[in-house]
Amino acid sequence: MAEFTVIKDDNGKIKYIETALTGNQLLENYALNKGTAFTQAERESFELLGKLPLRIETLEEQVKRVYQQFKKIPSALAKNIYLNELHDQNETLFYKLTDDHINEMLPIVYTPTIGDAVENFSLEFRHPRGLFISYSDQEHIEKILDAYSSDNIDVIVVTDGEGVLGIGDQGVGGIHISIGKLAVYTLCAGINPNRVLPIQLDVGTNNEALLNDPMYLGWKHERIVGEDYDNFIGAFVSAVQKKFPNIYLHWEDFGRDTARKNLDRYRNKMCTFNDDMQGTGAVVLSALLSASKLLKQDLTEQRIVFLGAGTSATGIADQIRDAMIRQGLSDDAARDRIYLLGRRGLITDELSDVTSFQKIYAKKQNEISAWEVKDGALDLLTVIKNVKPTILIGCSTVGGAFTEEIVKTMAEHVEHPIIFPLSNPTKKAEAIPADILSWTKGNALIATGSPFDPVEFGSKKIQISQCNNSFVFPGIGLGVIAVKAKQVTDGMIWAGCQALTECVLVEQDFSSPLLPDLDNIKEVSMKVATAVAKQAIAEGVADDVDIKKAIESTIWEPRYYPYNSQDVGCRSSQ
């Protein structure tokens, strides 16, 4: 990483940057490289004469060129690789390009294309980014972190690669998830990319294809579990807290049995957050609140069926239950309105191997004794027929699971069914929006996990909202970092969710999108950040500060700043 010092004015805005790097060292430093935008004075001062073409360009001119290069690339994965290589050459240009074309490039930088990048990590590996901490290096975790060249880190995104999107255990390839998530933090909320750190915890893999792949770059060993795993996580967190005592630790794509355990273990001891549970839950809840508002109903009136009972599904269920309680229901009454189906059907108290976080939603036998059940199967169709849900949410990663029969059966009992096929990547989606609208005669309210084009139905063009966590987690992170919150509380997440819902302009023709447009993502993130920061201060987990000033001084923008020479460099403190 770069050796440089950021000089700011009294308002916290960057005036110029001092660096001791010159020549090729400066050109090869992605955080400082300006390429053809170095001024004549900088070329002379930093020994760059002759190392660049004569013409001096603006950042905007550079963006035009690299965008033309981007457009010539045929596949989404190749585009992802191109953007990562651009980042490794010139970070500012990468963020300016993706910021100018965010609707087009966010699906390339993150979901759904990031899934392909993860699966092809070992084959397409070019340049290391972030840190790889292997179980075999557990005695050296502190040394690995101490060797990292900066102490000035605000947020770490860490994964162990076990529960990547809808494609499961991807081992060390999960680092792409951490990298992509941090890029979204910067694109959507202006988190400084020089103050973030992606980390991959390599604890083995149970993916036989990877274990048998001669090119696999991770530890070829079955995943460690139980006490060995918990001790390794404990050693990692302790080392992180020692190196970065004020860090915001973001857990990403951990497995069903570890995601909640890790969060519950540390959420009251440090500032930490799990996007698969808390972020997904908040953005889906916001879309449901928008749908309820459109229907002029309360969330407490809904009956919700989940296909899928893993980390994401139970995280969403928890957020919905919490919202129902806030709106007046008892805990028992809220849980009674939520039904989870796993691989063996409806979660009941008679099933074995039910996790603690699934158990609170398990239905007792007397609750379903009067149901009409064929051959004892408590499958999705049976549940739909008996529960008559108003909301159907898919977190199953089973493509096409919401069949025509399922959807039409649901629509028999509710005029405007709310149907969210959330599994991604796209091939894992439980249903296609065009099919859902056809089967419900255009009456369904839909949000998806992957991006879909608008659907022409009758004389209307219906926008399909994507339940993209990018609407929530960047703003939460910005608010947390700006006020230096010591914890992420349920109240802070609820505040962020409400702020997102307030950004949705609901019309009355039932074709309104349930979430904002990505074009407005920065404004949305600012509102979410402000709400989260206010709640953090109100709950006493952050000091009372000028929130607007704190947020503005935190935000980083992709632009070139003047460079001055210095004799001795130091890592950026910006």
Image (cartoon, rainbow, N blue to C red):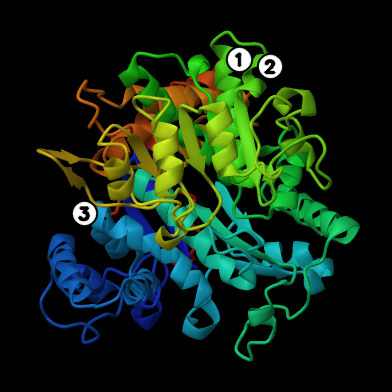
Tag 1 secondary structure: helix
Tag 3 secondary structure: helix
Residue 36: percent from left, percent from top: 20, 74
Which sits earlier in the primary sequence, circle 1 or circle 3? Answer: 3
Identified at 48% across, 18% down, the residue is: 299
Identified at 46% across, 37% down, the residue is: 478
Give the residue type at disc 3.
Answer: Asp
Task: Tell me the tag on residue 100.
Answer: 3
Quadrant of the image occupied by residue 180: bottom left
Cα–Cα gap, marks 1 and 3: 41 Å
Tag 2 secondary structure: helix
| In the rendered image, the vertical position of residue 453 relative to residue 332, given as above or below | below
Task: Tell me the tag on residue 325.
Answer: 1
Q: Which residue is denoted by mark 2 in the rendering?
A: 331
Residue nearer the viewer, 214 or 334:
334
Q: Nearer the viewer, mark 1 or mark 3?
A: 1
Quadrant of the image occupied by residue 484: top right
The extreme bottom residue here reads 214
Residue nearer the viewer, 326 or 439:
439
Which sits earlier in the primary sequence, circle 2 or circle 1? Answer: 1
- What is the tally of numbered marks visible in this picture? 3
Crowd band around label 3 with a 10 angstrom C-alpha radius: few (<14), some (14–19), many (20+): some
Q: Is residue 560 visible?
A: no
Residue 276: percent from left, percent from top: 57, 46
| In the rendered image, the vertical position of residue 152 relative to residue 571, given as above or below | above
**Mark 2 vs 1: CB contact within 8 A:** yes
The extreme right residue here reads 227
Task: Tell me the tag on residue 439.
Answer: none
Cα–Cα gap, marks 2 and 1: 6 Å
Give the residue type at disc 2.
Answer: Asp
Identified at 64% across, 80% down, the residue is: 210
